[in-house]
Structures are given as structure tokens and as C-alpha cells.
Amino acid sequence: MSPLSRTRSQTPGGLSGTAGTSRTAQRILGVDPGLTRCGFAVIEMQPNRTGASVHVQVTATKAEEDLSHRILAIQRAAEELLESYAPDVVAVERVFASSNAPTAMATAQATGVVIAAAAARDIPVAWHTPSEVKAAVTDDGTADKDAVARMVRRILGLPGLPKPVDATDAYAVAICHAWRSGIGAAYSMSAGTRTHQGAKTAMQKAAETQEGSMTPAQRAWRAAEKRAQGG
């Protein structure tokens, strides 16, 4: 990794790779974008909504460093994670506005290089707002940081509360996407998932396969459910 990035890395519970998970799991790289601190979390979520942490890290850069070097450090961190963990999808927290223009610009710059790194590898990218993430993880779109951290720990079976907050947020974004895009989820994020050259997540492919094997009656029931959900 670039010497310009200072990365705190941990693998809670001794998990690595795909140990303890099945091949049907969806692997998601959650990203809490930022130029000073960028949170990255890789999780694997099973179709039954049980999840496990694979890797988490926060890559930091210093404000006094040259801007181009700081952006490059975030890009290289993203590239190394994409190469090492080969996620099915990248989920990024979307921030619509900020009263602090420099902060908003830095977040956009970090987001851009992560998206570009994923696009270069044909890995789909999805965006979720902070309120969507909080609602998915805690059932409360206005939940505070402590509530999110406690739920992340419980959902992933972590030995302790994830730290720092950037790591917590990255985990939460990944969980949000997993629960909103998996087979059997009431809410489909397919329309909100950006794909590159037709790339699809493993769970989307599995869902298509499952739907193709349905009986006519099952397909009719599924269509009725989608209409009821406004889809």
C-alpha cells in the first residue's frame, strides 16, 4: 500500500476470506467516503440475513499532504481491497449536501476514485443515504452513532463495538445494501445499483435464476407482490 496512506486494519473474530461462509453468500465492500479518513468494510451476508465481517480498515491522509497524493492514497487502498477480496458489489454512502464546502468536495473526490476503481473491474456500485443506512440497520432513520454501532456489532457478531466511527459507518452501509438487495428482501435495490458493462451482483444473478425456475402460479404471485410494493 502507498506509504502516503496510514491504515488501521483489523479482522474481527479472526475471519478471513470466505472461512465459515457458503458460496451463496453475497460479499459487499461498504465504503464511508472521506479524504481525511475513508472507511472500508468487507462483509459476507447469507440469504437468511446472517452476516460476518471479513475485513475492515480506515485509510487516512493528512491535510498538509499534496491533494493529488491524498486522492491517490484512497484510490490505491480501494484497488487493493477490490483485488484482495473481490466483492460482488461496492456500496457507498451518499451525502447529498454539506454546509462545509471543502468537506463536501473532499468526500466527492474520495467517492469518485472508489467508483472508478470498481468500474475498472466491472464491479457494480450502489449508493445509500445516511438515513437509509440507519433505517436498515436500526429501524430508525434518525438513530445516533451509538445505536448504529451496537446493531452492527450484534448483526455481524463482532467481539466489540467497531471503531472508529468511519469503520462503523462502512459496516452499516454494507449491511444496508445486503439486506435491501438480497433474495427475499422486501425492497429491491436493483434499480439503484449502477452496473458497468452489464455487471450484476451474485445475488441478482441468483434471483434471476430462482425466478426462471418458478411455476406460472409462483411467477404470478411474485408479480402481484411487486405491484403491491409499487415495483
Image (cartoon, rainbow, N blue to C red):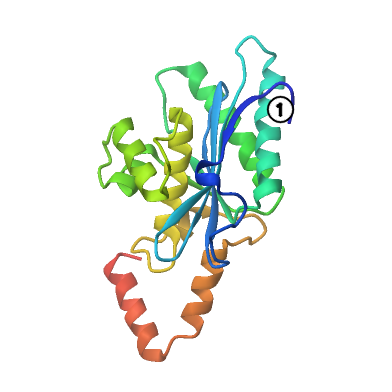
Please state the horizontal and vertical placement of residue 217, each as a whole percent of the image: 35, 89
Using the rendered image of the protein, determine whether residue 94 is visible from the camera's viewpoint: no
Quarter of the C terminus within the rendering: bottom left
According to the picture, the residue beneath numbered tag 1 turns out to be: 72
Q: Nearer the viewer, residue 84 or 52?
A: 52
Q: Quadrant of residue 227?
A: bottom left
Using residue 26 as the reference point, say whether residue 69 is left or right of it. Answer: right
Q: Residue at x 48, y 18 (%)?
A: 101
Q: How many marks?
A: 1
1 shown above or below 182: above
Q: Residue at x 33, y 64 (%)?
A: 186
Q: Nearer the viewer, residue 37 or 208?
A: 37
138 shown above or below 160: below
Please state the horizontal and vertical placement of residue 19, each as a whole percent of the image: 58, 57
Using residue 57 as the reference point, say whether residue 96 is left or right of it. Answer: left
190 shown above or below 97: below
Q: Residues within 10 Å of mark 1 (few under 14, many from 20)?
A: some
Q: Residue furthest top?
A: 64
Q: Residue furthest right?
A: 2
Please state the horizontal and vertical placement of residue 223, each as a whole percent of the image: 36, 77
Disc 1 element: helix
Q: Residue at x 67, y 58 (%)?
A: 197
Q: Residue at x 55, y 46 (%)?
A: 14
The residue type indicated by label 1 comes to Leu
Please state the horizontal and vertical placement of residue 178, each as a whole percent of the image: 45, 55
Q: Quadrant of residue 152?
A: top left
Using the rendered image of the protein, determine whether residue 209 is visible from the camera's viewpoint: yes
Quarter of the N terminus within the rendering: top right
Q: Quadrant of residue 228?
A: bottom left
